[in-house]
Amino acid sequence: MSKKENVFDAIIIGTGIAGLNAAASFGKDKSVLLVCKQNSWDCNTFYAQGGVAVAVDEEDVYSHIKDTIEAGAGLCDKEAVEIMCSDGRVAISDLISRGFQFDKDEMGNLLYTKEAAHSKNRILHAGGDATGRYIHHFLMRENPHRLLYNSIVTDIFIEDGFCHGVRVFHKEEFRNYYAKSVIIASGGVGSIYEYHTNASSISADMQGLCIEKGFDLQDMEMMQFHPTVFIHNKGARKQLLTEALRGEGAHIVDEKGKRFLFEYDKRGELSPRSMVSHAINDWKSKTSHEVYLRCNMFDEEFFKNRFPTIYFNLRDLGFNLPYDDVPISPAFHYAMGGIKTDINGKIPGVENLYAVGEVASTRVHGANRLASNSLLEGLVFSRRAVNDILKKDLYFRIKEFPKDEEILKKEIDKELKNELRSLMWEAAGITREETKLQKALEKIESMLKKDIGKLLRLRLNTSRNIVKSAIYREESLGAHYIIKKGDT
Ligand code: SIN
């Protein structure tokens, strides 16, 4: 361990499942600095309800691969999927052997539930619908490393094909931290959309920074919208209603009680989520009907125990579940695209910079992520990144970088951020049209020319990349649904 207190073996940006599991994988004897923007729990892992998908036995690995590739609509990297599905079993056994408790039946057998587009029940869950929160809590309790709260990473130092460290804004001052390796695990892009299910600090800035450093993002048009979200609560993050509800029998109905999803796909409520989101949107605009999630087929006691987060959160919002229908809308949920990495999470062109979890793109999710594969991805690829780093035993000579002051926020930013959110929702949302995308691109370019703070600029860089990628992909694929001229 270095004697200098701002020098570490590794710096990890983000404290969701990928960041915390990477920290755990380094072991206690490495010096690791974890950096998070606000509180450690302000991450998407914390709000993940459904669970973790994992093959139930060796034989099921093949069908987990097949389901993932089918949902991914031809854009998956087969090797990455094979790694996730086979190493996933080891990652889950490892988590259990470290003491994590998934939900079990009275006999002590693990309980597996079903979610859309899975060919069998293979979703493990904890605390009913609090899987992400339980895993986050567990990993935080395990974490032996230093954690810097309320710290925004404003720069990464790249020189001669090597990442030397990061600049952080903490307690009203800029600080430089250096390390042998840096792992970006900062999550997706939720805050650039008007309606989303993400933690409030997830705002696409590391993706935007990587663009400025010359690294590639890939598949950024592939944005996933969760079909069942209650969007009328206050606050930026909207209330997710897990897929597991539909997996276990809930229905989607319109105000006349019609289960209209069957007009779009014979799998009805269990169609892939891109299909369900599109169908809800389409039905609402065709019929002007409100659409609801109906849970009245569940026994109340069962519902309360199996879905306590939803039961209590919705009760606070005035719903008596499982009896009341809940109005739903699709909302932005997950970015399949991200910083391009190899299958060890390494960013091409730089020796010691890695990206894992939602911020990264190994193409494991292709054009449409299979439900509950993201927590598994976070576990598997964070471990691979750390193994790759440890194998290399990287040479390290500190190169000091200037402690430049940067203007992170300006007066005008707030208004533009709100404008950006509705622009992205309208133009790069569930359904896209080229003319709308072109207009959005012009608008983003003009915002980028204004006198704005750095954090908004980074968000805009990422948004521009999403819009350009959506324009570039002229045919619909997976989560990217584009209406062409002449289509009705
Ligand atoms: C959910 O619980 O429906 C979300 C699961 C996921 O995003 O994979």
Image (cartoon, helix red, strand yellow):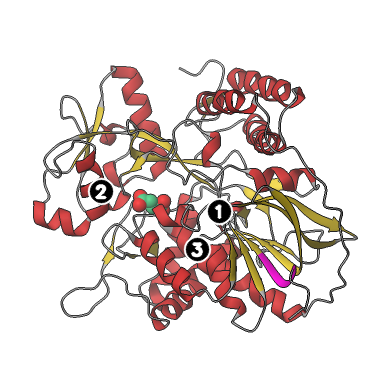
Front in this rendered view, residue 203 or 55: 203
Q: Nearer the viewer, mark 1 or mark 2?
A: 2
Q: Amino acid at mark 1?
A: Glu
Q: Answer with mark 1 or mark 2, whichever residue precedes in sequence.
A: 2
Asked which quadrant contains residue 360, the reply is bottom right
**Three-letter amino acid code at the position of disc 3:** Ile
Q: Amino acid at mark 2?
A: Ile
Q: Which residue is mark 2?
A: 310
* Disc assigned to residue 17: 3
**Which quadrant is the C terminus positioned in?**
top left
Q: Which residue is rendered at x = 18% and y = 30% of the image?
A: 258
Q: Nearer the viewer, mark 3 or mark 1?
A: 3
Task: Sort mark 3 into few (<14), some (14-19) or many (20+) by Cα contacts within 10 Å.
Answer: many
Label at residue 358: 1
Which percent across, then down, holds residue 342? Answer: 69, 62
Q: Residue at x 50, y 19 (%)?
A: 487
**Farthest residue toward the front?**
172
Number of disc labels: 3
